[in-house]
Amino acid sequence: MLKEVIATRYVTPLREGGSLPGIVEADDLGTYVMKFTGAGQGRKALVAEIICGELGRRLGLRVPDLVRIQLDPVIGLSEPDQEVQQLLRASGGLNLGMDYLPGSLGFDPLAFEVGACEAGRVVWFDALINNVDRSWRNPNLLVWHGELWLIDHGATMIWHHNWPSAEKAVAKPYDASDHVLAGFGPDIAAAAAELAPRITEELLTAIAADVPDEWLADEPGFDSPDALRRVYVTTLLARARTIGDHITLGERSKDKPSQAPEWLAGKPPRRAVK
Ligand SMILES: Nc1ncnc2c1ncn2[C@@H]1O[C@H](COP(=O)(O)OP(=O)(O)OP(=O)(O)O)[C@@H](O)[C@H]1O
Ligand SMILES: [Mg+2]
């Protein structure tokens, strides 16, 4: 079960995130990146963060620890930004927190080198969860202490926005051409052979149990949170069996592959990350 903490101080917003995540301190003395139930992306983004974040971690990928955070909007009363005030007011109760990695850098494929094995594992995992948010435009990877960390799994499992489409989504191919690690020769076959057998019903059921009932309640077509958990499990389980054969790595789209300043772009050597 995910640890539950209470937010004690709203520190600052993270402006680079579209959902306006914020840094908060909590009663366990931890510092977390908090994702709010009241954000425009809605509670399904938080469900995806838990299911995919925990799945990634259990597959051995690095994902910062997740916690449930209780928020009393009163902690943001002195926050001057009106947008933040509204977000906090709309998010009383349970929200999601991710351990804050102080001093981490955004991953840039021109500055860091990733091995084919690690790249393959990340690409296969993103294909499984249908992550459209790990492109070179928006890598959602951090480098911390020389290692690669995966963040932001809110825009995954597109099928959970339209459950009748889920059965079809199981076999939906994944185009990894614009994936931020596409240029590192990802060894997808090795990753599929290693990771697919580890996706079991027991594993997925345990992960789905971490999602709070209140984020799963009242979904049209499902009479209980557990009925909804079940379909998250069956969809990912079925997709894991075949997705390795349906990943394409084509030509990258034309725009610039990096947001890095010119003085950094192409400057050898790149630093290796694990
Ligand atoms: N655990 C963390 N430790 C340190 N910095 C983080 C962490 N999580 C997120 N960040 C920083 O905050 C930014 C926004 O976070 P994130 O991508 O999760 O938010 P989002 O609102 O879902 O963003 P997006 O605009 O990609 O949809 C990241 O790009 C990163 O710079
Ligand atoms: Mg992001």
Image (cartoon, helix red, strand yellow):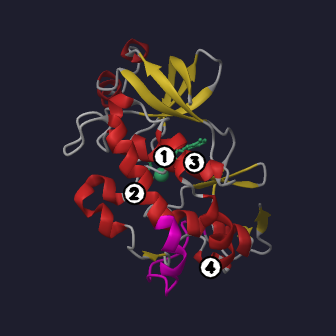
Mark 2 — residue? Answer: 157
The dot on residue 228 is none
| Residue type marked 4 | Gly
| Residue type marked 1 | Ile
Q: Earlier in the sequence, mark 2 or mark 3?
A: 2
Q: Is residue 114 magenta?
A: no
State the CA–CA distance, disc 3 to disc 4: 31 Å
Taking the image as shown, residue 267 lies to the left or right of residue 249, namely right
Pointer 3 residue Cβ closer than 8 Å to ligand 1: no
Split into 4 quadrants, where in the image is the N terminus?
top right
Expressed as whole percent of the image width and height from the top left, the position of residue 122 reads 61, 64
State the CA–CA distance, disc 1 to disc 4: 27 Å
Mark 3 — residue? Answer: 203
Taking the image as shown, residue 228 lies to the left or right of residue 10, namely left
Taking the image as shown, residue 222 lies to the left or right of residue 26, namely left
Q: Residue at x 24, y 42 (%)?
A: 222
Pointer 4 residue Cβ closer than 8 Å to ligand 2: no
Mark 1 — residue? Answer: 51
Split into 4 quadrants, where in the image is the C terminus?
bottom right
Contact flag, marks 2 and 3 (Cβ < 8 Å)? no
